[in-house]
Image (cartoon, rainbow, N blue to C red):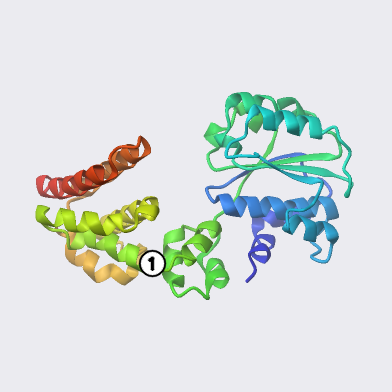
Amino acid sequence: MDIFNSIENSEDFNFFLKNANAISHSILLISKDEKYSMLFAKLLSCLILDKKIDKNSLNYQKIMFESHPDVLYFPKKEKLLVADSQEIVAESFVKPVFANKKIFIIKNIDSSMESAQNKLLKTLEEPSSEVYIISTCTNQNLVLPTIKSRCQKIELAKLPDEQIKKIIEVSPNCNLVVSLCDGQLGKAVDLSKKNDLQEMVTLAVNVFTKMLKSNQVLEYSKKIQEFATEKELLLEIMQIVIEDLLKIKVNKLESLKLKNFQNELVDSSSNYTVRALCKIVEVINKFQKEMFYNSNYVLALENMLLNILEVKFLCK
């Protein structure tokens, strides 16, 4: 199934389809899935310009290739700056050149400074009849209340597993990807492209099932370092392993995400108390903070692995 077909068939998009003639001029799309919300914004732009989804339309084709002169993308760099907001305000007074509307798509407005958001307030509150502003965010708590109050807020629903399967069914790790992506289409597409995903999951599981003594820490540290460019993902998978171990402790085997590793996890679950697993989450979170502040990665990694073993022993 095509990704855009999937979005078009979603309940969220159907809401706009049914109200194609009365779409708000200021919209805030809320989703942890950045890729999905941006694709949603592009398809919504097509609907605003054509009042329907017509894949043969020049508007549709230009928007899909991001070459439409009246659909402008911000920020220009990583975060929305005051200069970006000033450009949006200035451009909002310029007549569209190809279509009869002008659309601004702002990615991750929640990552911008307050000053950049404040510059948009009047434009969001009183946009001209030709101007639409579609903003996306992953954390609406970081969006100014004054911005949110001026926008129609749409919390995009996660996609059902079966729908994601149809999109990534050619991936050899299809089932594993679905179990890890948490209903996020963009994340599923990214994971489906990782040839070493199975290897990463196996390593994360082995940290909790086969790393039993401190003299194994260096061995596992070296294995984890081989995935240095994927360290955030590997830590996320480790968190999922902990979640599955906690589910086993309360006999919720049917909801395990890593079902292919069920036997290993069940066999090892008796080595961990619930308190130990909760403490290990804190250990991993601490390691993530140390990485963020550019600590010595190898040293911090080895400390994390030692702390996992220590917590496991002390919390028996």
- Label 1 residue SS: loop
Position of 112 with respect to 149 (left or right) is left
Residue at the (71%, 26%) spot, across then down: 121
Q: Is residue 54 above or below residue 91?
A: below
Residue at the (20%, 44%) spot, across then down: 303
Residue at the (59%, 25%) spot, across then down: 114
**Residue 15 visible in image:** no
**Residue 189 visible in image:** yes
The residue that mark 1 highlights is 196
- Between 82 and 168, the one nearer to me in the picture: 82
Q: Is residue 281 above or below residue 58?
A: above
- Between 271 and 80, the one nearer to me in the picture: 80
- Between 218 and 74, the one nearer to me in the picture: 218
* Dot 1 crowding, Cα within 10 Å, few <14, some 14–19, many 20+: few
Query: In x, y percent, where is residue 251?
Result: 26, 61
Question: Quarter of the image holding residue 314?
Answer: top left
Query: In x, y percent, where is residue 224?
Result: 28, 56
Question: Quarter of the image holding residue 221?
Answer: bottom left
Query: In x, y percent, where is residue 199?
Result: 33, 67
Question: Quarter of the image holding residue 240?
Answer: bottom left
- Tally the marks: 1
Position of 295 with respect to 22 (left or right) is left
Q: Quadrant of the N terminus?
A: bottom right
- Between 236 and 51, the one nearer to me in the picture: 236
Q: Amino acid at mark 1?
A: Asp
Query: In x, y percent, where is residue 97?
Result: 89, 45
